[in-house]
Image: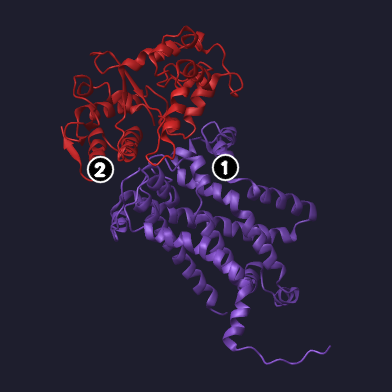
Chain colours: A red, B purple
Amino acid sequence: MQGFEMLLYGTDGATDNGGDPLYDEKSRKWKAGTKGFKDALAFVETVYREKLGPEVSDALDPNIATRVRGELLPEGRLGINLDGSWLPQDWLPGSGHAWPDWSERLGLAAMPTQHGQGPGKVSMSGGWTWAIPAKAANPDLAFAFIETMQSKANARKWYIANSGIAVREDVAEDPAYAKAQPGIAFFTDLVAHTHYRPAYPAYPKVSTAIQEAMESVTTGDASVAEAAENYDEELAAATDDQVTRG
Amino acid sequence: MTRRPGRPPHPALRSLIRALPVTPATVLLVLFLAGPIAYCVSIAFTDLQLTGQAEDSFVGLENFRTAFGDEAFRNAVWLTLVFTVVSALLGQNTLGLALAALMRRASKPVRTLVGGVVVTAWVLPEVVAGFLLYAFFRREGTLNAVLDWLGLPTQNWLYTLPILAVSFANVWRGTAFSMLVYSAALDEIPKEITEAAEVDGASGPRRLWHITLPMIRRSIGTNLMLITLQTLSVFGLIWVMTRGGPGGRSQTLPLFMYEEAFQKSMIGYGTAVALLLLVVGSLFSVVYLRLLRTEV
């Protein structure tokens, strides 16, 4: 079950300078009972209740993502797939389901906001970072190593090789990078409007609670109101009651 | 040179010398078996998390209180019981006994063929078996193809009856073990006893009930104990087939434990659930041990 946060970060509460829809930086509390959360759940519920998406049983199949990438999209059996920049990696030669002309048969579009309100598109990013442990024996050498790895030439080589999205602006503007893969320029442009999940220790639990809420409206086990209420309870338990009600 | 009979060493010294050869094994056992278990028990009483928290603290029975108050935990306990009773006690056990009994009368080629097929299912790696049964039960799977050919209604079994689908998978995968145990046990029954019963006019079912079952009672007990403990810890099979879903409808305790400990990063709570799983296993064992004790 994916895609909920793409909906949530495009709702009113998130786009009108309300900040992160999950976490309030000012009060350092997690947000419960927001309208945006319920709106996003309602969207998911509508998709499955009105049969606009896949069959519920297919959507909950643990191998659905593999089928989408390997069968449904290449065979032209799926109209819209809400996915990310990593997807074309699965169609490279040697991947088992190579699809060399994917960029001619698939169009790319940014995820719109709830009512098309500014900035008009939503994107979520995650990732990794190079870090030096506080107790490292030789932090200066480690820093020099990271500097070398992240130089323009090396970073460009790295992002082209693993079809990642560059974080250096000079790499992003480099034609060799921009043309390395179809779609790279499109995804790199989205970084300007991208959101990051709240990186706090409680987040994995919050993420699971979101999954559960989304799954329960998908199966019809719970209404939107019930699922949102369950999420609020789970959120309070997951964050030691560090919760604010919007 | 003749060996003079020496004085026997002091008893304490003697037992020390005798203990010497087993010392390395004991140290290894304590270090690698008892150690992790003790560590496991100790963190079950803390709020240890895998999220880089500054420090964890002792929380007493809090984790256990949380578990019993958690609807998802109670659901997992119930599903674990269903899974164990249906797939191990009823499925693997009865089917294994039936196969073992039938194979005694079968001709050699049939015996080799059936034995080979059943044992193959058993030796397959868990993930491979899980994927095969996923392919069998899914909407475009083999089962539905057969049902469709017979003109019967089809459905996505992993969605409509997930716990039965994974139970069947466990039967398919685990029956060989029971079959082998019972084959060995049935070979042990002296022919004369069966023949005597036959001469006395005992029918097939009567012979089974009054001769065979009582005579292999110990094997039944051992087999039940082993397959129950194996089934209680099944993880990979269910994970591959359903991930415990949809909506937690096939989430047995091992999967619940994994979700809490590694997906939500609450390793302390997950470990407490592991200890509760251990309790469930011991309860089953106690029942079997009692069954074993009564003499006929």
Depicted A67 relative to depicted A186: above or below? below
Whether label 1 touches label 2, CB < 8 Å: no
Q: Position of residue B123 (x, y in %)?
A: 65, 49
Work out whether residue B68 or residue A90 is closer to the camera in this orientation and state it.
A90
Q: Which residue is drawn at 55% across and 55% down?
A: B91
Q: Position of residue A11 (x, y in %)?
A: 24, 22
Confirm whether residue A187 shows in the render: yes
Q: Position of residue A180 (x, y in %)?
A: 51, 11
Work out whether residue B266 or residue B73 is closer to the camera in this orientation and state it.
B266
Depicted A75 relative to depicted A2: above or below? above
Q: Where is residue A65 in the image (x, y as percent from the top left)?
A: 47, 28
Q: Which of marks 1 and 2 is in front?
A: 2
Work out whether residue B193 or residue A27 is closer to the camera in this orientation and state it.
A27
Q: Which residue is drawn at 61% across and 72% down?
A: B22
- In what quadrant of the picture does the C terminus of chain A appear? top left
User: Which residue is the site of mark 2?
Assistant: A239
User: Which residue is the site of mark 1?
Assistant: B127
The Cα–Cα distance between marks 1 and 2, rounded to whole angstroms, is 35 Å
Element type where label 1 sits in the image: helix
Within 10 Å of disc 2 (Cα), the crowding (few <14, some 14-19, many 20+) is: some
Q: Which residue type carries mark 2?
A: Thr
- Specify whether B273 is left or right of A90: left
- Specify whether B196 is left or right of B85: right
Element type where label 2 sits in the image: loop
